[in-house]
Image (cartoon, rainbow, N blue to C red):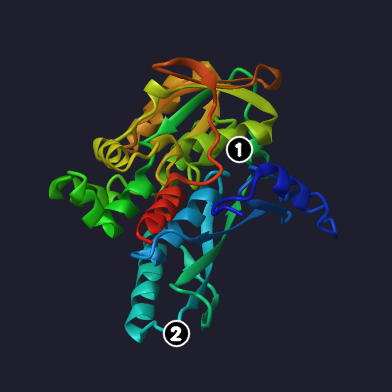
């Protein structure tokens, strides 16, 4: 199998028969849904598990952010975190200290308590692998936001910019290749600091949009980029969509890195961008709410009936929404390794 997410049809088959059902589970394992939601009586518990598979540098920071992002997209507040860290035998004590320091720093900044986890040195892993479980809560279950909540006719809003996470990884870990392709040190340094500015956290944006009371669906952009996230919203909501490529926000350093390495930014790892859907009349107020927390937003398309399909409008006209079976970063890494053999 190719690196990346399982094909949606395979994943749907696997999730169709998982054993014991619990009536307290409000949102369980479904294609496109990133969090489980469990009814705890006066509130709901939100649970999310996600690994870091591309980044090595600052991976402890990454794992907290990507898990917290998904909890925030439900309208919930991240509260508790449990990391699982698998280390190769070549690791040093300083390596472990650095990862733990990054985890602790990221959790402190968003007010999350580390409540457990697991760490081991093991054979068979070429580099550190870390997965996290983030638990959060939402006090009013009636306000739960899900990926599947998008409605026919909703406008699609995207925040900040696409390909931020992928560009940051490339700028940090593939400097030599990018310099050889003509990128200067200023562009590389700017992109390398995308973790902090504009940042890969969507917590402020998700909270601002949630507080408007207008959003029907929220979904952060991760592996497979904006296009994969849009496809997941459409699949979960049983809808189609049309998106305008020229309206999609793309930071200049992201554009330069993607052009240099011949990557499509719409399919590149994209934590830092948040997709929200809402009625068209609520978009101006939503954009103002984002602006108040220092986040930019753009209206890029519309949800439509499932029978009308999935479409992308770009300079070449209207075409079927592309599909990225694997992230553009994974494709680049694999092709680069082949070229060196």
Residue 311 placement (x, y as % from top left):
55, 21
User: Can the viewer see residue 73?
Assistant: yes
Q: Quadrant of the N terminus?
A: bottom right
Judging depth in this view, the residue of 144 and 150 nearest the camera is 150
Q: Residues within 10 Å of mark 1 (few under 14, many from 20)?
A: many
Residue 244 to residue 28: above or below: above
Marking on residue 232: 1
Residue 160 placement (x, y as % from top left):
36, 36
Judging depth in this view, the residue of 292 and 65 nearest the camera is 65
Q: In this rendering, which labeled residue sits more in front, label 1 or label 2? A: 2
User: Can the viewer see residue 42?
Assistant: no
Q: Which residue is disc 2 drawn over? A: 89
Q: Quadrant of the C terminus?
A: bottom left
Quadrant assignment, res 259: top left
Residue 88 placement (x, y as % from top left):
46, 80
At horizontal 44% and vertical 31% (from top left) the residue drawn is: 158
Q: Is residue 263 left or right of residue 87?
A: left
At horizontal 76% and vertical 52% (from top left) the residue drawn is: 14
């Amino acid at each position: 199998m190719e690196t990346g997410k399982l094909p949606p049809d395979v994943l749907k088959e696997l999730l169709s028969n998982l054993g014991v059902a619990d009536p307290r589970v409000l949102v369980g394992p479904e294609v496109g849904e990133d969090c489980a939601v469990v009814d705890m009586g006066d509130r709901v518990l939100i649970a999310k598990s996600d690994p870091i598979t591309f980044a090595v540098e600052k991976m402890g920071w990454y794992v907290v952010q990507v898990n917290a992002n998904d909890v925030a997209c439900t309208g919930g507040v991240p509260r508790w975190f449990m990391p699982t860290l698998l280390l190769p035998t070549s690791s040093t004590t300083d390596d472990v200290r650095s990862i733990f320091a990054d985890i602790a720093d990221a959790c402190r900044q968003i007010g999350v308590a580390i409540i457990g986890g697991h760490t081991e040195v093991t054979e068979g892993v070429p580099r550190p692998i870390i997965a996290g479980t983030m638990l959060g809560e939402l006090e009013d279950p009636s306000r739960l936001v899900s990926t599947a909540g998008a409605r026919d006719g909703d406008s699609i809003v995207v925040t900040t910019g696409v390909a931020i996470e992928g560009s940051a990884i490339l700028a940090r870990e593939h400097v030599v290749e990018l310099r050889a392709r003509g990128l200067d040190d200023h562009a590389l340094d700017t992109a390398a600091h995308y973790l902090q500015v504009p940042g890969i956290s969507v917590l402020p944006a998700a909270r601002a949009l949630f507080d408007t009371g207008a959003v029907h669906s929220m979904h952060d952009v991760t592996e497979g980029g904006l296009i994969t996230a849009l496809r997941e919203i459409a699949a979960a909501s049983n809808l189609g969509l049309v998106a305008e490529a020229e309206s999609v926000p793309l930071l200049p350093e992201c554009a330069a890195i993607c052009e240099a390495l011949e990557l499509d930014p719409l399919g590149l790892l994209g934590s830092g961008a948040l997709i929200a859907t809402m009625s068209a009349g609520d978009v101006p107020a939503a954009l103002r709410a984002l602006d108040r927390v220092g986040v930019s937003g753009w209206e890029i398309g519309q949800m439509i009936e499932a029978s009308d399909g999935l479409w992308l409008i770009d300079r070449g006209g209207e075409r079927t929404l592309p599909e990225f079976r694997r992230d553009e970063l994974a494709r680049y890494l694999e092709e680069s390794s082949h070229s060196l053999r």
